[in-house]
Image (cartoon, grey):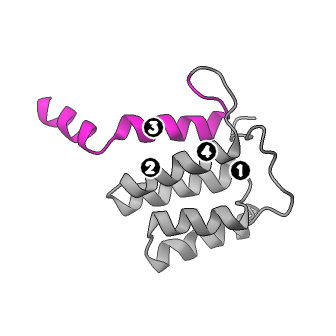
Amino acid sequence: SHQCMDNFNKQSLLDISDTEQTLATGKTDDDRSPKVSELVSSVEEELQSISDPADRFRLLAIFIISQQGLRQIDQTRLFTAAQLPQLEERALSNLTKVGIPMVQTTPATSKGMGGLMN
C-alpha cells in the first residue's frame, strides 16, 4: 500500500482528479464557478507537470469537451503545453466528427465555465 500511495503522490493524481472534476461539474471544491481563464491556466500547469502522454491526452480531451471547444489562443497554448504526439492531436481534432467543436464559434463567457454536468 505504501508503494501505491507513493505512485499516487508522485503522479499528482489528486491534483489532476480535482481539475478533471472541476471541468466535469463546472464547480470547484468550494462550489465556485471558475473563470475560463483560470481553468486554462490550471490545465496548462497540469499538462506541463504530467509525464504520461495518455493522462495529458485525457485532461485536454475533457477540457475541450467540457468547454465545447477552445478559443484559438487557448488551443495553441494548451496543445503546446500538452506536447502530444501527432496521432493524439489528430484524435482530438476528430472530436468534431462526434459534434464537439475544436475551436469555439462563439466566445466563451469569462465569468464561468459550463462543465459536462450543466
For the record, the magenta segment spans 1-29
Residue 7, by quadrant, is top left
- Secondary structure under tag 4 reads helix
As measured in the structure, the alpha-carbon distance from the residue carrying label 4 to the one carrying label 2 is 10 Å
- Secondary structure under tag 2 reads helix
Q: Is residue 2 magenta?
A: yes
Residue sitting at x 57%, y 57%: 61
Measured as percent of width and height from the top left, residue 73 is found at 68, 66
As measured in the structure, the alpha-carbon distance from the residue carrying label 3 to the one carrying label 4 is 14 Å
Q: Where does label 4 land, which residue?
A: 39
- Judge depth for marks 4 and 1 and give the one in front: 4
Residue sitting at x 67%, y 25%: 32
Main SS, magenta residues? helix
Q: Around disc 4, counting alpha carbons within 10 Å, would you say few (fewer than 14), some (14 to 19), or many (20 or more)?
A: some
Identify whether 30 is placed above or below 75: above
Q: Is residue 102 visible?
A: no
Q: Nearer the viewer, residue 38 or 94?
A: 38
Q: Where does label 1 land, which residue?
A: 67
Please state which amino acid type lies under the numbered disc 2: Glu
- Judge depth for marks 3 and 4 and give the one in front: 4
Please state which amino acid type lies under the numbered disc 4: Leu
As measured in the structure, the alpha-carbon distance from the residue carrying label 4 to the one carrying label 1 is 10 Å
Q: Earlier in the sequence, mark 3 or mark 4?
A: 3
The N terminus lies in quadrant: top left
Q: Earlier in the sequence, mark 4 or mark 2?
A: 4
Q: Around disc 3, counting alpha carbons within 10 Å, would you say few (fewer than 14), some (14 to 19), or many (20 or more)?
A: few
